[in-house]
Image: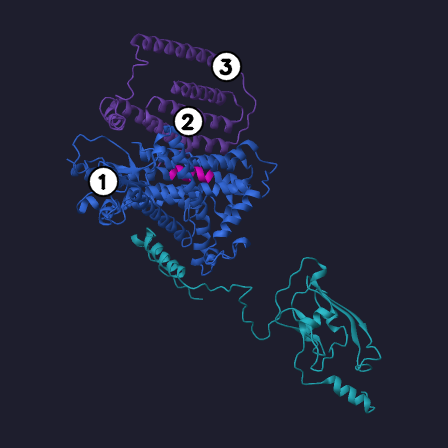
Chain colours: A blue, B cyan, C purple
Amino acid sequence: MFDFYFDLPHWIRMALQGLAVMLVMFPIAAACSMAERKIAAWIQDRPGPNRTLAPILAWVPGIGFLQRLGIFQLAADGGKFAFKEDAIPGHVNKFYFVAAPIIAMIPALTTVVAVPFGAYIDSAGKLVPIVLANVDLGILVVFAVSSLGVYAVILAGWASNSKFPFLGGIRASAQLISYELSMTLSVLPVFLWTNGPLAGEPAGFTGSLNLARVVEFQSQAGFWGGAWFIFLMPLSAFIFLVALFAETNRQPFDTVESEADLVNSFGSEYGAFKWSLFYVAEYAHMLIGSAIFMILFFGGWNPLPWYTLSDLAHHLNFAHLPLVMGVVGIGIFIGKVLAMIFFFMWVRWTLPRFRYDQVMAIGWKKLLPLAIANLVAYTIGIALLYR
Amino acid sequence: MAVIPVERKPLTLAERTYIPQIVGGLRTTLKHLFRKPLTLEYPEQRPALPVGYRGVPTLVKDPNGREKCVSCQLCEFVCPPKAIRITPGEIPEESTNAHVEKAPQAFDIDMLRCIYCGLCQEVCPEEAIWLQNQFSMSGYTREEMVNNKAKLYELGGTLPDAHFKWDKKKAAEEHGNAH
Amino acid sequence: MSSDIFFYIFAALTAGSALAVVFTKNTVAAALSLLVSLVGVAAIFVLLDAFLLAALMVFVYAGAVVALFLFIVMLLDSQGGTRKPFKKATLFSGFVALLLLIVGLASFAQRGAQAAIVHEVPAAAVPVGASLRAYGEQLFTTYLLPVQIVGFLLLIAMLGVIVLSKKFEGLGDIK
C-alpha cells in the first residue's frame, strides 16, 4: 500500500522524510518551552500555566486536563509571537540582526540528518536503522554542523550593538569552543570500542563513526555485549554530559543567557518571532544533544539494558512488521530523549549558575585533563582488549 | 571581644567534584516535584484573611441603617496621601435623622492614592470608616478607581454597633438636654 | 550533469566570498565571508566524495577557528580605518606570490591533463566507509613526519603567543 511512495523520485522522498522529521522536531522543541515552565512550576510547588483555553473548545469533555497542562497556553504564546510587532531597534546592524535567528535555526534543524532514531528488521532479517542520512561520519557531522550554532549567538550579540548582548556573544563563543574539546575527547573511547569487530563480523572491519553502529554495539548478546556504554564508560558519559550542558548553555553553565547579570544577553534586543526562533533553536540543540547522549551511552532505541528492541519485537511478536517495529523503536527513542530533556530541566531548577571564570576553570583545568586521561586509559584498555 | 579562630576544613575530593551536593539538590527538587502546590488558584480560591486585615476603606451604617459618618473631616485631614475628599452638608429637614448630626454630601476616596494605612479608621470618632476585607480593586479608568459615597456604603454594609449613639442623641434631644 | 552545476555554484560562492574577505572594510563582515568561503570549500569536498575532509573543514575551521577570529575582531572593534599605502617590499613579495600561484596552477592543470584522471576517478570504487580508516592509516604511516612537523610548528606558535601575551619583565617572572 506504500508502493506509490517508493515510486517517487529519490529527492522528493528525501525532502518528504526531512520535512517529516522537522514536523516532529519543531513542535517538540516548542513544547519543551512549555514543559520547562510546567516543571519549573512543579518544582517550586506551583501549578504553572493552567488557564488558557480556546472558548470554542470548552465544550469538549476532558479538555480540562489539557488545559491544566498548559497546552493551549503554548498555542496562545506561539500565536502571540507570530502576530506581535516585530520591532527592529534603530541602533542595530540590520542585516546581521535579521540573519542571526535564521542562522540559529540552520544547524539546529540540520544536525538531525545524521542522527538515527529507530530501527526495523527488513525482509532479509537484518536490523536496519531509521535515519535520514546513514553516513559513516555520523558523530563528526553532528559535531561539525552543531558547532556552527555559535555563530547565531555571536552575530546576534554583535549586531545588537549594545553591551549586554555583546558580552553574551563573547561568552558564548569562548564557552562553546572550550567545551567542544572535552566533548569530542569524551566520545572517542566509545568509537574506539565500536571499531572493534561486531559479533559475527569478519576481522577486516572498516573504520566508522556511524552512530547506528554504536547502538548496534550495545545490542549484542551476552553480558558485555548488551551492556550500555554508561556501564562500560561512566566517566566518558559524565564528561559528555557536563560538556553537553555547557554546549547547550543550560544551567549550571548558563553564563551566556544569564538573566541575572546580562538581562537576556543576546536576546535582549530581540522580540516577537525572531526571539522565539532563538529559543526553538536552543531546544532543538538540546533535543539533538540528548539524542546523541542516548545513542552513545544509553543504548539508543533499546528499551532496557540487556534487552534489545529486537528481543521486544520477538517477544511481542511484531518483528515481521517493519512499520510497527519502526514506530515502537522511534517511540522508545523519543521517550528516552524526552526523559533526558526532563533531566536538563530538573537540573536547571536545582542548581545555581556558575560564575563565568568558574565555567572556564572547570572546562580547561578540570574537564579537559580528565577527558584526556580518560581517553588514554581507555585507549590502552581497548588496545589490550582487541589485541 | 574574644576572637575565636575557626579552622575551616579543607574540602574533601567528593565535595570538590560537587557531585554529592548536586545529587542531594536533585533529590530535594524531585521531592518538591511531586508535592501538592502551595499556591491558591486565586479567583476561585480566596486566601483566609486574618482578623484586623486592612483592605479597602469603606463607610459603614449602624444597625438601624443610618449613616454613621458625621463629616467631621478628620479622616480627610489625617490621610497621608490625601486620598479622601469630603463635602460636608446638613441632613435635610424631612429626614428622621435631622437635627442630630451633620452628614457628608459627597465622600470620595481615590483608590489610586490610598495607601491602606488605616489612619482614617484609627482617627474616626464615629467608627464610621472601616478598612475591611475587600482587597481587590480594579478598573479601566481613573474615574472608576474613585469610590464615591454610594459605592463606599455598598462596600461597607452594616457593622454591629453596641453604642446606638444616634438613638441616644435623638432621645436626649427630645428630652430637651441636647448636650 | 548536476554535480557540475553544483560545482560551479559552490566554486563561485567560495571565490566570491574569498574576494569579499579581502575587499570588505568591515572586519566582522570579512570574517563571516571567510566562514562562507570555508563552507563553500567543504561543499566542494563533498562533491569530490571527500566527506571526512568536508566534515573536518566545517568542524575545525568553520566551527572553531573563524569563531575565534570573530571573537578577536569583536574585542578589537576596529571599523575600517585608513589604509596605508603598500611598501615596496610588500608589492614585490605580492607579485612573487602571484607568479608562484600562476606557475603552480599551470603545472597542476598540465599534469592533470597529462594523467587525464579528471573524469576517471571512480567514485563508487572507493569504498566510502574505508575513507576514515584509510585516512587514519595514512596519517600515522606515510605522512607521520609532516604531521609531527606541523604539530611542532603549532606548538612553537603557541609558546610564542604565550610569551608575547604574558609580557615577562625579567627572568623572575618566569615561574
Secondary structure mostly seen in magenta is helix
Badge number at residue C87 = 3
Disc 3 chain ID: C
Disc 1 chain ID: A
Residue A171 in magenta?
yes
Q: Residue at x 32, y 23 (%)?
A: C49
Badge number at residue A378 = 1
Disc 2 chain ID: C
Badge number at residue A56 = none
Residue at the right extreme, as displayed:
B93
Where does the magenta region start and end?
A: A170-178
Q: Nearer the viewer, mark 2 or mark 3?
A: 2
Q: Nearer the viewer, mark 1 or mark 3?
A: 1
Q: Are marks 2 and 3 in contact (CB under 8 Å)?
A: no
Q: CA distance from mark 1 to mark 3?
A: 55 Å
Above or below residue A19? Residue B97 is below
Q: Residues within 10 Å of mark 3 (few under 14, many from 20)?
A: few
Amino acid marked by disc 3: Lys
Amino acid marked by disc 2: Val
**Residue highlighted by disc 2:** C39
Above or below residue A35? Residue A143 is above
Res. C64 in view: no
